[in-house]
Image: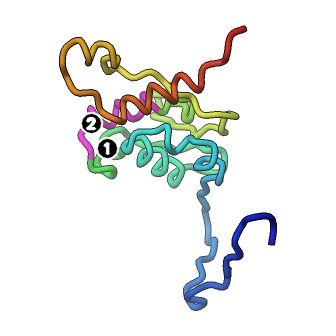
Amino acid sequence: MSGDRPFFDRTPIRPDRVRKIDGSFAFLPHRFVRAGFWASLTSTEQRLYVLLVLAADRQGMSFCYDDRLASQLCVVLDDFLLARAGLVRKDLIAYDPVGPRYQVLSLLERPIIAPTARASIADDHRTGRPVAVRNMIHDFLARMNQPTRR
């Protein structure tokens, strides 16, 4: 055992159903969760990212039409387009509409907390609209991701 980490029995619960890698293989590195990339995404961005990882070849490339991806995610096209734009802004995927081609990119050192098209907390306060906890957390993470100036 190392440090404070508890021991986990890694023996499969169902040894008759241990999964095997047959043919193609998709993966998400643990760092995707540990470094905060997963938490930096909206739920639709999370689902689209995982779908693109599953569809990608070993170089991260996949060739999918927007309407098909939106249908597989069970979202309207507008929500799909917002999610794709978010993943591009956060530098997790590259997109070429000519193909259409998608590339899942290697992870940066830290996630990019991209600004969204929503009103700021100050604007919400002035207009009397309630501020969602999610917006406050988003703004906090965006400030934490800013380089300090000296």
Quadrant of the rendered image containing residue 9: bottom right
* Disc number placed over residue 77 in the picture, else none: 2
Q: Which residues are magenta?
A: 75-86
Residue reaching furthest to the left: 128
Q: Are marks 2 and 1 in contact (CB under 8 Å)?
A: yes
Q: Is residue 77 magenta?
A: yes
- 2 or 15: which is nearer to us? 2
- 115 or 148: which is nearer to us? 148
Tag 1 secondary structure = helix
* Disc number placed over residue 106 in the picture, else none: none
The quarter of the picture where the C terminus appears is top right
**Where is 65 relative to 17, above or below?**
above
**Where is 15 relative to 129, above or below?**
below
Separation (CA) of disc 2 from disc 1: 6 Å
Q: Amino acid at mark 2?
A: Leu
Tag 2 secondary structure = helix
Q: Which residue is mark 1?
A: 70
Callout 1 environment at 10 Å: few (<14), some (14 to 19), or many (20+)? some
Left or right: residue 109 compared with residue 146: right
Left or right: residue 65 compared with residue 129: right
Quadrant of the rendered image containing residue 48: top left
Q: Residue at x 67, y 16 (%)?
A: 148
Label 2 vs 1, first from the N-terminus: 1
Q: Amino acid at mark 1?
A: Ala
**Magenta span: chief secondary structure:** helix
**Where is 99 relative to 127, above or below?**
below
Q: Can you give x and y, in whole percent of width and height, for residue 104 in the image?
A: 58, 40
Q: Can you give x and y, in whole percent of width and height, for residue 89 in the image?
A: 50, 25
